[in-house]
Image: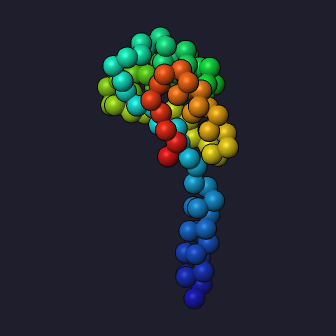
Amino acid sequence: MTKEKYSEELLLQEEELKQNEIVLFNDEVNTFDHVINTLIYACDHVPEQAEQCALLVHYKGKCTVKTGPYDDLEPRCSKLLQAGLSAEIV
């Protein structure tokens, strides 16, 4: 009985901790500089972080660029989309 209750509590905690993510996808249009500058502007990345994300997107096809609550991510994702990048919240 105690083990079942503990398992239920863990599942509830995992659901509470689940964060949304902005995933940025590779394209053949935008330059590295544009992607880096947009990540700095829209996601509050430091330049090194933005550069690493841009490289991951280029070589892996996609990269999670920001995690957090949906209300925080939605305007950030909109800025990425307005800048011509391909991104979505998952």
Closer to us: 82 or 22: 82
- Classify 35 as above or below 18: above
Answer yes or no: is residue 61 visible.
Answer: yes
Closer to us: 32 or 29: 29
Quadrant (top left/top right/bottom left/bottom right) for the N terminus: bottom right
- Tally the marks: 0
Point out residue 67 in the picture as x, y percentages from the top left corner: 57, 40
Q: Residue at x 47, y 33 (%)?
A: 87
Point out residue 29 in the picture as x, y percentages from the top left corner: 37, 17
Q: Residue at x 49, y 38 (%)?
A: 88
State left or right for residue 84 relative to residue 18.
left
Q: Residue at x 60, y 84 (%)?
A: 2
Question: Which quadrant holds residue 26?
Answer: top left
State left or right for residue 74 relative to residue 84.
right
Question: Which quadrant holds residue 32?
Answer: top left
- Classify 49 as above or below 24: above
- Classify 21 as above or below 78: below
Question: Looking at the image, which residue sits at the far right?
Answer: 71
The colour scheme of the drawn protein is rainbow
Q: Residue at x 63, y 59 (%)?
A: 16
Point out residue 57 in the picture as x, y percentages from the top left corner: 39, 27
State left or right for residue 47 relative to residue 27.
right
State left or right for residue 76 relative to residue 31.
right
- Classify 56 as above or below 37: below
Answer yes or no: is residue 64 visible.
Answer: no
